[in-house]
Amino acid sequence: MVLDDKFIGRHQWENVEQTPMPKDIPDVDEVGATSAPLLSASYFIGAKCKPYNDDFMLCKDEKNGGSVECLKEGRRVTRCAIDVLKQLNKHCFDEFKLHYTCLEQENHRLGNCRKAEQIFNKCVFTHLNLEKKIPEVKEQIHLKESKIFHGNGADAGLVKAFLAKKEEPTN
Amino acid sequence: MQDLPPIGGYDPVQWKRNVPSRGFRPVIYFWGIVGFMSFGFYRFYQGVDEQRELSREKQWARFYLQPLLLAEEDRQKARRYFAEKARQDLVAESMSPTRRAKFEEEVYEDKSKFRFPRFRATVQPNDR
């Protein structure tokens, strides 16, 4: 119990477990991306890492939660996701950034960032050969042209400026 | 003897003002409103469809991220479990054999699956 800089109590303690993982379990980097980049990359992570993700989730399903048993599968999932994010940063850094900053500004509404998403998806398709596809449904909402909800349209202006800036050096 | 109407009838009585009727015929208003409302409902349900697809898109984005987030969380859970287990073993070392046997007795009969421990051994409150 802390009262105005005075500590009253028997022990000062913090409810954080500092002990590292045992030595026999291999280390793995954490993804470390925030929500907007993850949301932006999610369909590509899903497309590329489907076998690892499915394996991990099935393992968890079989093992009653499997928090301790499925560590190996979990490491594979994380490594795969990190790999996808690295690839995105390598080939489509600017488009990726444009899309996730837009998502951040637009309250994570994917529908308000279609223009940025369009050029990002195009870049990913040309470089990584990954395509965004919403499963189990014929109508792909991200490809729809005429919309009811279009947001404030700030995204269109940003994309226009981005494309103009990108074309400048070639001229 | 009864008073009869004058020959050739009474003069006509003006029972309505001489104002021209405003606006269109009523039927035009009726169909106009029906058409306007139909268009409104059509656009509304288009919007409903679009919202449904937008939320579907968001849900699938989450489904694709879920294994990744769970993997990270599980690693933290496992790390805490292993740390706690190491601490429990240290506590158990200082116990008398009978007490230790009782302490290490399994809580659950069913050994088919792993469970995180619900209870843990600590030092006596007075010794803290």
Image (spheres, coloured by chain):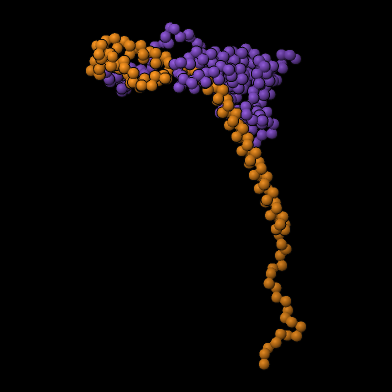
Chain colours: A purple, B orange
Report the side of A97 relative to A164 (left or right). left
Position of the N terminus of chain A, as image quadrant, is: top left
Question: Which of the pair B119/B57 is nearer the observer?
Answer: B119
Position of the C terminus of chain A, as image quadrant, is: top right
Residue B69 visible within the image = no
* Residue appearing at x 51%, y 15% in the figure: A73
Q: Residue A43 in the image: x percent, y percent? A: 60, 22
Quadrant housing residue A109: top right
Q: Residue B120 in the image: x percent, y percent? A: 32, 18
Q: Residue furthest right?
A: B8
The answer to whether residue B20 is above or below residue B111 is below
The answer to whether residue A33 is above or below residue A138 is above
Q: Residue B52 in the image: x percent, y percent? A: 60, 34
Residue B106 visible within the image = yes
* Residue appearing at x 39%, y 13% in the figure: B82
Report the side of B50 relative to B119 (left or right). right
